[in-house]
Image: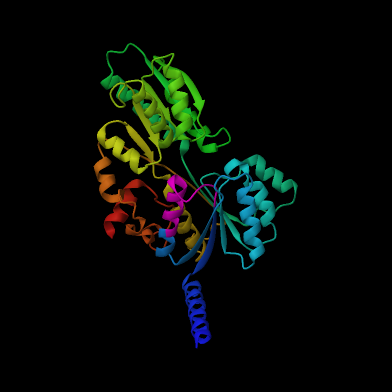
C-alpha cells in the first residue's frame, strides 16, 4: 500500500513538471555571475516576473563570483542535455568569449545582458572559427550617462547647499577595474569634473563594488583631507563611505554629499531622509527587458531583425520623485508590473520603450 502511494505521488510530481514545461512557450537559462541577493538578485527577480507574464520558463544559475564559475555552470548545464531555447550571458570578467566557445555547436541562441562582448573578443572568436550567428540580442544600460548625471547632481547640490566653501573636493569610488559598467560610469563622472574647473577630484579609487572597501578607502582619505562630495559607482559603496563620514563626526547630506547607482531600497530611503542626493538606476530591470526581447524573437515579432541591440537609459531618483518611486516600486513586488505592455506587436512596431515613465505606468496599469 505504501509503495502504491509513493508511486502515485511520483506520478503526480512528474505530471505537474510536464504540465509546467508545456505551459511555457520558450525556455531560458540565465547564468548569473553574482548572488541571489542584492543587485544581481533583483536582476533575476525582474526576469522571473517578466517570464511569468510572458509564458517563459526561466532557470537561473548563480556563479556567486567564483573564478570560472559561469563557465563551470554552463558546462554542467550542457552536460544535462535538453538545452534551452536561449542562454542569457553576462560578460563579467570578460568570461563570455570562453562561454561562447563552450556553446559552439549547441542549438541555443544567446542574449548578452548588461555587459556585451567586446570587439576584441568578437575578433578573437572569429579567428578561432567560433560562430557568432547564435547571438540574437544584447541589453545594455547607458552607464556613461549615469556617471555623468550623478556627478553633475552632486556638484549642483554642493553649489546650492555648501556656498560658503571656496572650492569643492570630491572623492570617487569605482567598481572592478575589469568592469565595463564601472569604467563607463567613471568616464561620465570625469566628464562632469572637467566641466567644473573649481572642483578638485582628490582621488578616484577602486573599491570593487564592496561596501567595506569603500568604508576603508574613505576613512583613510578623511584622515588627511577634507571631503565635500563622494561619488560612488554603486549604492553599496556610497553607504560604506557614509559610515566612514559618520565615524569622523560628520553628517551625510549636510557636511558631505553623496550619490549612488542601483535604486536599492536603502538608497531610496536615504534620498528620502536627505542623506543622499540621488540614486540612479533601474538597470536591474534589464533582466525583465531580456525576456521581453526574447519573447518577441521567439514569436518573430521583432520585425525580422537578425540582431537586436538595445541600449537603454537609467533614471534618477531624487527628493523630487522619491515618494512616487517608493509608492510604485518600493515593495519590490515586480509581479505588479504588466510586462506585456513592453512587447512589440502589429500595433506597436519600432523600438522598445524601457523608460522609467513607461515602467511606472505599467505598475499603475495593474
In the image: residue 166, left or right of residue 206: left
Where is residue 192? Give x, y as percent: 42, 25
Q: Nearer the viewer, residue 316 or 76?
A: 76
Q: Examine the image and state in which quarter residue 253 appears.
A: top left
Any part of residue 110 in sight = yes
For residue 271, above or below residue 159: below
Q: Across the whole image, how many numbered discs are drawn on residues?
A: 0
Q: Nearer the viewer, residue 86 or 357?
A: 86
Q: Residue at x 41, y 31 (%)?
A: 240
Question: Is residue 43 on the magenta stretch?
Answer: yes
Where is residue 197? Give x, y as percent: 41, 15
Where is residue 103? Give x, y as percent: 66, 56
Question: Is residue 49 on the magenta stretch?
Answer: no
| Residue furthest to the front | 2
| Residue furthest to the bottom | 1
Q: Nearer the viewer, residue 66 or 326?
A: 66
Any part of residue 286 in sight = no
For residue 218, above or below residue 292: above
Secondary structure mainly formed by the magenta segment:
helix
In the image: residue 164, left or right of residue 247: left
For residue 130, above or below residue 119: below
Q: Quadrant of the C terminus?
A: bottom left
Q: Residue at x 37, y 42 (%)?
A: 264
What span is colored magenta in the figure?
A: 32-48
| Image coloring type | rainbow
Q: Nearer the viewer, residue 322 or 212?
A: 212
In the image: residue 203, left or right of residue 75: left
In the image: residue 304, left or right of residue 211: right
Q: Examine the image and state in which quarter residue 88 appears.
A: bottom right
Where is residue 263? Give x, y as percent: 37, 42
Amino acid at each position: 500500500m505504501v509503495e502504491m502511494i509513493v508511486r502515485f505521488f511520483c506520478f503526480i510530481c512528474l505530471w505537474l513538471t510536464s504540465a509546467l514545461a508545456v505551459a511555457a512557450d520558450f525556455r531560458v537559462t540565465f547564468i548569473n555571475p553574482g548572488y541571489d541577493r542584492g543587485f544581481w538578485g533583483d536582476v533575476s527577480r525582474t526576469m522571473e516576473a517578466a517570464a511569468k507574464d510572458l509564458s517563459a520558463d526561466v532557470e537561473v544559475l548563480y556563479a556567486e563570483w567564483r573564478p570560472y564559475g559561469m563557465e563551470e555552470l554552463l558546462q554542467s548545464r550542457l552536460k544535462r542535455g535538453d538545452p534551452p531555447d536561449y542562454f542569457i550571458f553576462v560578460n563579467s570578467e570578460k568570461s563570455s568569449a570562453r562561454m561562447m566557445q563552450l556553446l559552439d555547436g549547441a542549438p541555443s541562441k544567446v542574449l548578452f545582458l548588461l555587459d556585451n562582448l567586446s570587439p576584441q573578443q568578437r575578433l578573437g572568436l572569429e579567428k578561432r572559427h567560433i560562430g557568432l550567428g547564435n547571438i540574437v540580442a544584447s541589453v545594455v544600460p547607458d552607464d556613461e550617462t549615469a556617471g555623468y548625471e550623478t556627478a553633475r547632481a552632486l556638484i549642483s547640490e554642493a553649489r546650492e547647499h555648501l556656498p560658503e566653501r571656496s572650492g569643492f573636493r570630491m572623492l570617487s569610488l569605482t567598481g572592478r577595474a575589469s568592469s565595463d559598467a564601472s569604467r563607463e560610469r567613471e568616464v561620465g563622472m570625469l566628464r562632469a569634473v572637467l566641466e567644473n574647473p573649481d572642483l578638485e577630484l582628490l582621488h578616484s579609487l577602486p573599491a570593487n563594488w564592496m561596501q567595506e572597501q569603500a568604508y576603508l578607502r574613505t576613512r583613510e582619505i578623511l584622515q588627511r583631507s577634507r571631503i565635500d562630495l563622494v561619488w560612488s559607482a554603486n549604492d553599496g559603496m556610497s553607504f560604506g563611505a557614509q559610515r566612514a563620514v559618520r565615524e569622523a563626526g560628520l553628517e551625510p547630506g549636510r557636511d558631505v554629499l553623496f550619490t549612488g547607482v542601483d535604486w536599492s531600497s536603502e538608497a531610496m530611503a536615504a534620498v528620502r531622509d536627505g542623506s543622499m542626493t540621488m540614486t540612479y538606476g533601474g538597470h536591474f530591470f534589464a533582466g525583465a527587458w531580456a525576456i521581453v526581447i526574447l519573447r518577441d524573437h521567439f514569436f518573430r515579432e521583432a520585425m525580422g531583425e537578425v540582431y537586436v541591440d538595445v541600449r537603454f537609459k537609467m533614471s534618477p531618483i531624487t527628493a523630487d520623485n522619491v515618494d512616487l518611486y517608493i509608492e510604485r516600486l518600493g515593495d519590490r513586488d515586480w509581479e505588479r508590473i504588466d510586462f506585456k505592455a513592453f512587447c512589440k506587436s502589429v500595433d506597436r512596431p519600432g523600438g522598445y520603450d524601457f523608460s522609467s515613465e513607461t515602467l511606472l505606468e505599467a505598475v499603475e496599469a495593474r
